[in-house]
């Protein structure tokens, strides 16, 4: 199964844009023209208001064609896939939605009232689907039949060149078909149905379904609209996964596990003197080295398997907190998941073998005569290997510290960077989109009376300014359109458009560079006037932009530039500020933004609630603050920073445990030397420096090794942001100093303990 991706490129400017929305006619054309395609289906998502028994709910509503269940084999709990959506005004819902609306009642045949942009009426439930797992991009609540819907049937057969690409197209290939070969043929389809002019800027790609959930950002820099809406408008966590975060969390987990394994090796060698005589006695009575290796490996494996049930219990206890934190539905039912069980057993076995390998090889090499006489010493090779392990341990810890500092600094930069508009004390109300419902005629919508609505909210003295606009900050604007400018030949660019009223710039404090603002007294402003940002002027190559005519390619709208505004960040800082135009379009506004006083906020919100009910009664009052909305755009990075902090603290704690044991081992090996030095006049500080200097050298070596790796990793992560921090050697020096201080505090305890001991006790046997 593959999803079709549309790529559009501009001419004369280095721009490429990818999106999953395609024209309705594409599915039938693929089925008709390419024998490799076994089946094709379309899916279109919309937000609707659903009513049942005088209760209103906002839901996502997916329209699908009859072939949907031929491609996606979703189990039916009630109803049949062959007949569920064969009649007009029928819907299929998931078991979760069935419980939400009908409880324990049988949902089959129940009636739900739908109020949406394209649909309005009563729909009958004809099927119930098993809930889909959360780790899929195909998140559905309701599926709607398109049978008898003339509007959608018309969209099914149309090629939309620029706008109104409403559908995601999925195809199922025959078993022997190769997607790469089919993808190479797709440009011919564009030539055949749309024409060479569109073909010059457009092509299609095929994305395997198993890559959609985790790899869409990586493959095509696509983030699903539902994911953005969930994170921005609904102020919740997005549902789309990101393989880069999976890799980062996995690497952090492996790093902590590696430190734990090194600790086990250090602890085992630290108590080697306690087991040396045991090894000597076993060898005297005939034990071979191979037998001793097996014994020590078995011991470490047994310890690892004894730790496994404890780890599972801790994991189960922490799972609810983790699910809440990540907004996921993870489970740890290992008895019902043989793959997970076998994976845990394999990892545990590997950890046991890895952590026990060095102690087994080290202890089994002791010579019986030397250890029984008490003269056995660690050779240079073993000492070098032990020090190398310590260096690796320090390096991992330093790498995690660098990562944590970098993420924290980038988040601080995001929160403090000037965005080019005012976000403080702005309340956003989705009042126009809530009212829109099934009113396809813009003149019937509340947005056509936006000025009346604004004035009603401005009646309260705490409401200072108001503006109506279409696309919320953080979600981008309308799908990019190809634009050409008057007098500029052979140059077309992709430009995003925002629809907004005359108070948009004033309410948000967006800076004017030249020209004039929209005016309601000039009727031509509603049909022709366009504001451009600096990037649009630059990309279009306009030296004198005011008064220039702008043509939207493949679309009848033309306009004249009346104003140039300073660039502002309408999207997140991951995106570079691109060309953008703003024009007035009464009837198409979705949101109302209100600038309010910083005092008496609760009183102001109560007034907004009452005023909301005047225009959209029986609909729940919905609002959010602009600054909170913008912060939700970076929830992924915030979670990453929090997880890295937790892993870093855990890694440092485990590393300190190992360092504590290793310093104890070192002090034990040098007890007599320290006693002699004290007799000869060495102070406590001299002894502490003596025992600490080796660890300081190891930390310095670890820094030199890990800094290039940390620099590369930081650069790669920061590439996700068009606007990011600059960093130099200071970050690495800070990380190294922190690790050095933590290590010295750990080592100093053992050093001081030995330094203050009575040398007579240690030298009595000499």
Image (cartoon, rainbow, N blue to C red):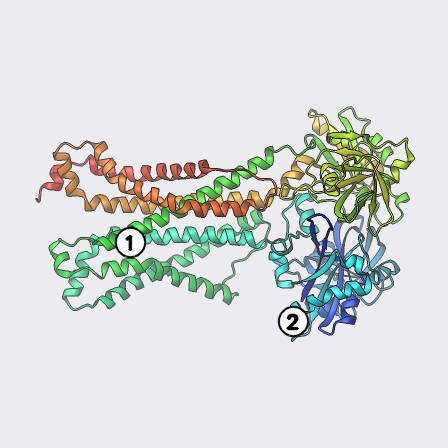
* Disc 2 element: loop
Q: In this view, does 611 lie to the left or right of 307?
A: right
* Left or right for 327, reference 268: right
- Residue 69, located in which quarter of the rendered image? bottom right
Front residue of this view, candidates 146 and 195: 195
* Residue 76 visible: no
What residue sits 81% from the left and 56% below the top?
161
Camera sees residue 41: yes
The spot of residue 652 in percent (x, y) is 39, 44
Tell me, for residue 385, which label it has, or none. Answer: 1
759 relative position to 226: left or right: left
- Disc 2 crowd rating (10 Å Cα; few below 14, some 14-19, many 20+) is few
Q: State the residue at coordinates (50%, 45%).
A: 714
Instruction: Name the spot of residue 594 as percent of width and height, x first.
Output: 76, 32
Q: What's the mark number on residue 178?
A: 2
The disc, 2 or 1, on the residue closer to the chain's N-terminal end is 2
User: Is 466 in front, or is 494?
Assistant: 494
Label tally: 2
């Amino acid at each position: 199964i593959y999803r079709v991706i549309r790529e559009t490129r501009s001419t004369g400017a280095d721009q490429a844009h990818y999106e999953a929305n395609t024209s309705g006619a594409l599915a039938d054309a693929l089925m008709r023209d390419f024998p490799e395609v076994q089946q094709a289906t379309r899916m279109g998502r919309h937000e609707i208001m659903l009513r049942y028994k005088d209760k209103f709910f906002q839901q996502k509503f997916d329209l699908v064609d009859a072939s949907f269940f031929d491609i996606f084999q979703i189990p039916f709990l009630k109803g049949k896939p062959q007949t569920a959506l064969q009649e007009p005004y029928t819907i299929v819902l998931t078991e979760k939605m069935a419980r939400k609306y009908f409880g324990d009642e049988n949902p089959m045949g129940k009636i739900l009232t739908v109020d949406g942009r394209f649909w309005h009426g009563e729909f009958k439930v004809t099927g119930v689907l098993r809930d889909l797992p959360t780790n899929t991009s195909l998140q559905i609540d309701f599926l709607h039949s398109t049978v008898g819907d003339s509007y959608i049937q018309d969209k099914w057969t149309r090629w939309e060149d620029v706008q109104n690409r409403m559908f995601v197209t999925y195809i199922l290939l025959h078993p022997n078909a190769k997607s790469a070969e089919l993808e190479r043929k797709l440009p011919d389809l564009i030539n055949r149905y749309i024409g060479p002019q569109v073909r010059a800027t457009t092509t299609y790609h095929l994305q395997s379904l198993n890559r959609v959930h985790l790899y869409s950002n990586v493959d095509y820099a696509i983030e699903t609209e539902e994911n953005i809406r969930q994170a921005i408008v609904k102020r919740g966590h997005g549902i789309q996964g990101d393989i880069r975060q999976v890799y980062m969390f996995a690497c952090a987990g492996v790093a902590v596990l590696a430190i734990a394994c090194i600790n086990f090796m250090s602890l085992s060698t630290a108590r080697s003197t306690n087991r040396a005589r045991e090894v000597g006695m076993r060898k005297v009575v005939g034990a071979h080295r191979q037998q001793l290796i097996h014994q020590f490996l078995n011991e470490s494996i047994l310890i690892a398997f004894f730790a496994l049930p404890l780890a599972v219990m801790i994991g189960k206890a922490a799972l609810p907190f983790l699910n809440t934190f990540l907004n996921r539905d993870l489970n740890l039912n290992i008895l019902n998941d043989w793959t997970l069980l076998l994976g845990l057993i394999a990892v545990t076995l590997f950890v046991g073998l890895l952590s026990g390998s060095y102690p087994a090889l080290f202890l089994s090499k002791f010579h019986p005569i030397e250890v029984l006489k008490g003269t056995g010493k660690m050779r240079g090779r073993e000492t070098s290997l032990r020090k190398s392990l310590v260096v690796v341990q320090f390096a991992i810890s330093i790498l995690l510290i660098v990562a944590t500092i970098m993420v924290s600094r980038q988040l601080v930069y995001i929160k403090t960077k000037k965005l080019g508009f005012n976000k403080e004390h702005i309340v956003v109300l989705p009042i126009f989109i809530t009212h829109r419902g099934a009113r396809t005629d813009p003149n019937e919508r509340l947005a056509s009376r936006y000025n009346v609505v604004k004035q009603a909210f401005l009646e309260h003295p705490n409401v200072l300014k108001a503006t109506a606009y279409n696309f919320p900050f953080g979600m981008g604007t309308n799908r990019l359109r190809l634009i050409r400018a008057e007098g500029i030949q052979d140059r077309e660019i992709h430009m995003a458009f925002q629809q907004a009223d005359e108070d948009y710039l004033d309410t948000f404090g967006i800076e004017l560079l030249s020209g004039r603002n929209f005016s309601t007294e000039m009727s031509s402003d509603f049909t022709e006037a366009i504001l451009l940002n600096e990037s649009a002027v630059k990309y279009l190559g306009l030296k004198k932009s005011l008064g220039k005519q702008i043509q939207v390619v493949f679309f009848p709208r033309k306009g004249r530039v009346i104003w140039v505004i300073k660039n502002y960040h309408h999207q997140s800082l991951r995106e570079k500020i691109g060309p953008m135009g703003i024009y007035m379009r009464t009837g198409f506004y979705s949101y109302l933004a209100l600038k309010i006083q910083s005092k008496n906020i609760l009183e102001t919100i109560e007034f907004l609630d009452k005023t909301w009910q005047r225009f959209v009664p029986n609909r729940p009052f919905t609002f959010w603050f602009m600054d909170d909305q913008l912060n939700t755009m970076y929830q992924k990075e915030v979670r990453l920073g929090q997880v890295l902090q937790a892993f870093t603290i855990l890694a440092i704690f485990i590393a300190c445990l190992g360092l504590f044991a290793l310093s104890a081992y070192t002090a034990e090996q040098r007890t007599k030397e320290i006693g002699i030095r004290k007799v000869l006049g060495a102070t406590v500080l001299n002894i502490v420096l003596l025992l600490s200097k080796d660890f300081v050298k190891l930390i310095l070596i670890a820094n030199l090794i890990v800094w290039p790796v940390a620099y590369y990793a930081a650069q790669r992560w920061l590439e996700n942001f068009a606007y990011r921090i600059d960093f130099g050697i200071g970050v690495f020096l800070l990380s190294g100093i922190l690790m050095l201080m933590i290590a010295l505090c750990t080592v100093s305890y053992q050093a001081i303990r030995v330094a203050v001991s009575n040398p007579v006790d240690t030298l009595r046997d000499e």
